[in-house]
Amino acid sequence: MGFIKSTIKSVVLILLVIRTVGVYSKDLNETERALRAAFVQKLLNKQRYLDGRIKLVGGPNRFEGNVYIYHAGRWGAVCDDSWDDAAAHVVCQTFNKTGVATHGSQYGEAAAKFWMDDVVCQGDETSLSHCIFTGWGSSDCESDEAAGVRCMNKTEVPNNYVKKKRESKKLQEVLDLSSTSLRLAGGNNNNEGRVEIYQYGTWGSICPDGWTLYEASAVCRHLALGYAEQAAQTNYFGNSKIVLSGVNCEGNETNLFQCNHEEYGEVTCPGEVGHVAAVVCTHYLADLVLDTTAIERSAHLHDVMMFQLQCAMEEFCLTKSAYEIQKTNPDWQFETRRLLRFTASSLNAGNAEFRPYLPKHLWQWHLCHMHYHSMEVFATFDIMDASGKRVAEGHKASFCLEDNSCLPGVEKKYSCKNYGDQGISVNCSDIYYYNIDCQWVDVTDLQPGDYKFKVAVNPHARVPEQQYHNNAASCQLRLAETYAVIYGCQLERP
Ligand SMILES: *[C@@H]1O[C@H](CO)[C@@H](O)[C@H](O)[C@H]1NC(C)=O
Ligand SMILES: *[C@@H]1O[C@H](CO)[C@@H](O)[C@H](O)[C@H]1NC(C)=O
Ligand SMILES: *[C@@H]1O[C@H](CO)[C@@H](O)[C@H](O)[C@H]1NC(C)=O
Ligand SMILES: *[C@@H]1O[C@H](CO)[C@@H](O)[C@H](O)[C@H]1NC(C)=O
Ligand SMILES: *[C@@H]1O[C@H](CO)[C@@H](O)[C@H](O)[C@H]1NC(C)=O
Ligand SMILES: [Ca+2]
């Protein structure tokens, strides 16, 4: 229905443009011509103004339903992969509300193509389109995977929703470890299955809500099965009564019982009935290690005129104020932006290749940079102020993974040229030198001062790795009037 409406709108728009252009050949006077041109311009502006608009469909009222977002002249659905309450909050903020996420087309099958997939929000974004996602229209989701929200007044958020998060406790504090154990069940081999926990004479399952590779890593290490290749929320390996929910690990635990959890025993578990937490373990995985020295050595400021940044602007590599200047200042090309440039290099120190998670047919061709991007969010760059608030961020980075430099004796295999296979071989590094487009944070709007600077690769653990505590660097940033230094970088988890 929405799709038909927007199609009709587009057709009307095209007809109007044709008519307006057509009248040039007829003898219309200047005034009339100008009026029509202004009319079309107004329509086009409206179209642009609508971009990023949200509507909720299929719910009992307009504050609840599957999420549709307007982009490039039509409405599209949002896939529920990675969809969580932070994203729901961003959506509901449109109505000055907060809310909770729903999954699996809870309000009916998606009635339009998916515009967004793998949406990851911090919760403080002013629009869903500012969250990280795979790129407009790039999705491998089925129509029964629509993301939805249930918005509510900020005052009526159930107390336990907020409290539960705070009451998170380490499992080893509530379990009697001497009579507890862990196993995988229902798998085709010993390395996979649903995760079951034993206590008081019975085996029970784990609520899959929030189950990620971080939690799965703790399970695989706990059972001496290596690393986690997959964290699944499924009934594929069968199920049993769910006795544990809200499990939350850092990802470096040697034992699942070192992780936090919310409830044990009689638990509430949102999501699809019968689905439980499962893992697939392996001894062979990639392990990216971010090079902190390269960041510290290469960081510097660079003032660039905006006419040199048109490609970068198309890929949203500048902050919002740049786009406002472009809209309001006729001489915008001659304004300058201040860029904090640096080199980001990551070595694959694991024992398997690092491969992008999107299949090749979903890679996006980036006209400006003339290559395919296989992984929209390979790295994030953020600047935080003293209170930890994010004050600047790198663009929603899109990347092409390749072997730029390998240790002696290792042959380069992956290259971004000619729709080549993308990845990072063992003992090779993928390097984004400071002088390439978009390899920066736009700091034009920041006052001089001391900040925190954070770079992270594979930031949402989309691609499995042996460990994640070497994927991010947290550094000090001193921004002076004329120069910048980055120092004291330390490796941590994204
Ligand atoms: C242009 O045409 C409109 C109506 O056709 C008329 O009202 C207007 O006076 C004309 N203006 C000029 C400058 O000729
Ligand atoms: C948003 O909601 C809060 C609490 O319900 C209210 O205090 C505030 O005035 C609202 N703001 C707007 C802009 O409506
Ligand atoms: C939520 O807030 C709106 C506007 O402030 C109000 O009309 C509505 O009754 C509230 N709903 C509930 C359930 O409190
Ligand atoms: C895991 O990493 C956290 C920091 O993210 C650290 O505080 C903790 O000590 C680490 N735990 C283990 C078991 O290494
Ligand atoms: C990678 O380098 C390490 C250390 O230099 C070495 O032990 C390992 O065998 C190398 N692996 C491959 C596949 O080249
Ligand atoms: Ca790593």
Image (cartoon, rainbow, N blue to C red):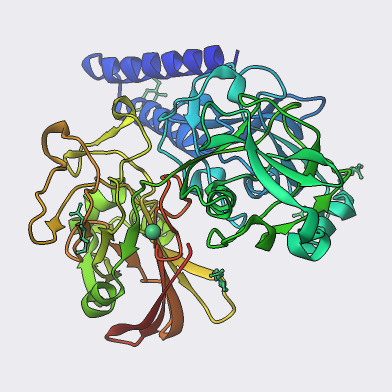
Above/below status of 136 relative to 11 = below
Locate ligand 4 by image quadrant. bottom right
User: In screen coordinates, is 59 left or right of 249?
Assistant: right
Considering only vertical position in the picture, is 215 above or below 480?
above
The number of discs equals: 0
Residue 209 position, x and y percent, is: 69, 41
Let me know if residue 425 appears in the view: yes
Return the x and y of residue 16 as percentages of the image width and height.
39, 17
Residue 9: image x %, image y %? 49, 18
For residue 474, side relative to residue 430 (left or right): right
Front in this rendered view, residue 286 or 172: 172
Residue 70 horizontal side relative to residue 450, left or right: right
In which quarter of the view is residue 254 placed?
Answer: bottom right
Residue at 30%, 46% in the rendered image: 354
Q: Nearer the viewer, residue 164 or 397?
A: 164
Quarter of the picture holding the N terminus: top right
Identified at 45% across, 15% down, the residue is 12
Q: Residue 248: image x %, image y %?
A: 66, 55
Q: What residue is rendered at 76% in x and 31% in y? A: 240
Placement of 418 over or under 214, stated as above or below: above
Instruction: Depth check: give the residue in front, 472 or 214.
Output: 214
Q: Is residue 74 left or right of residue 184?
A: left
240 to 425, vertically: above or below:
above
Instruction: Examine the rendering and report whether any part of residue 331 can be seen.
Output: no
Identified at 64% across, 17% down, the residue is 109
- Foreground residue, 328 or 367? 367
